[in-house]
Image (cartoon, rainbow, N blue to C red):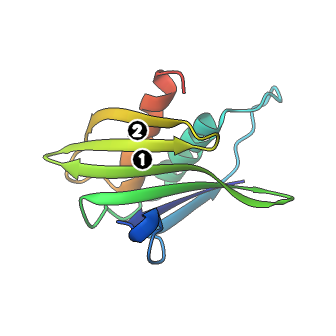
């Protein structure tokens, strides 16, 4: 099961200071039994959420997303995405579970986009680039 937690800003040391704005939880399995990549599964969880619900808009120009995976052995952080939005564009840096750090090209955001919509745009860009 994936948990996608969206936080406003972050504290010292890169650790969010408070409760998340929202948390999305879900698990997506392919019919043929093949595993989805982390980003593919996150994309599907976000799409299912956005088909049914809305999430809050980010209250500030900076926000952080933590993606965690629940396993029998416990919960592990598998990705961290830091967002900075300015002038209807969002830039993001992504730290994946194996220590890979990826910068994402600027993504256009509409002033009415909610947090999950912005995160989904960035995740789709990462998938398109082969991450």
Q: Is residue 39 above or below residue 46?
A: above
Q: Where is the C terminus found, in terms of image quarters?
A: top right
Q: In this orientation, does residue 69 appear?
A: yes
Q: In the image shown, does 76 or 36 lie closer to the viewer?
A: 76
Q: In the figure, is residue 1 to the left or right of 57? A: right
Point 35% across, 65% down: residue: 9
Whether tag 2 and tag 1 are in contact, CB under 8 A, the answer is yes
**Residue occupying the far right of the picture:** 72
Point 59% across, 41% down: residue: 99
Q: In the image shown, does 131 or 115 lie closer to the viewer?
A: 131
Q: In this orientation, does residue 117 appear?
A: no
Q: In the image shown, does 5 or 13 lie closer to the viewer?
A: 13
Q: Secondary structure at mark 1?
A: helix
Point 54% across, 64% down: residue: 23
**Horizontal and vertical percent position of residue 118:** 36, 47
Residue tagged by mark 1? Answer: 119
Point 45% across, 49% down: residue: 81
Residue tagged by mark 2? Answer: 122
**Horizontal and vertical percent position of residue 10:** 39, 67
**Residue occupying the far left of the picture:** 87
Q: Is residue 20 above or below residue 94?
A: below
Q: Is residue 70 above or below residue 33?
A: below
**Horizontal and vertical percent position of residue 27:** 70, 49
**Horizontal and vertical percent position of residue 69:** 70, 53
Q: In the image shown, does 99 or 131 lie closer to the viewer?
A: 99
Counting labels gives: 2
Mark 1 crowd level (few <14, some 14–19, many ≥20, 10 Å Cα)? many
Q: Secondary structure at mark 2?
A: helix
Q: In the figure, is residue 4 to the left or right of 114? A: right
Q: In the figure, is residue 41 to the left or right of 23? A: right
Inter-mark Cα distance, 2 to 1: 5 Å
């Amino acid at each position: 099961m994936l948990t996608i937690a969206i936080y406003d800003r972050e504290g010292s040391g890169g650790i969010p200071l408070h409760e998340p704005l929202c948390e999305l939880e879900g698990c997506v399995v392919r019919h043929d039994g093949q595993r989805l990549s982390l980003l593919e599964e996150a994309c599907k969880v976000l799409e299912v959420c956005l088909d049914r619900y809305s999430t809050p808009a980010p209250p500030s120009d900076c926000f952080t997303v933590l993606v965690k995976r629940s396993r029998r052995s416990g919960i592990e952080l598998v990705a961290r995405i830091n967002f900075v939005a300015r002038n209807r564009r969002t830039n993001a840096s992504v730290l994946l579970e194996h220590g890979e750090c990826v910068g994402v090209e600027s993504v256009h955001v509409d002033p009415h986009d909610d947090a999950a919509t912005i995160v989904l745009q960035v995740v789709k860009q990462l998938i398109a680039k082969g991450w």
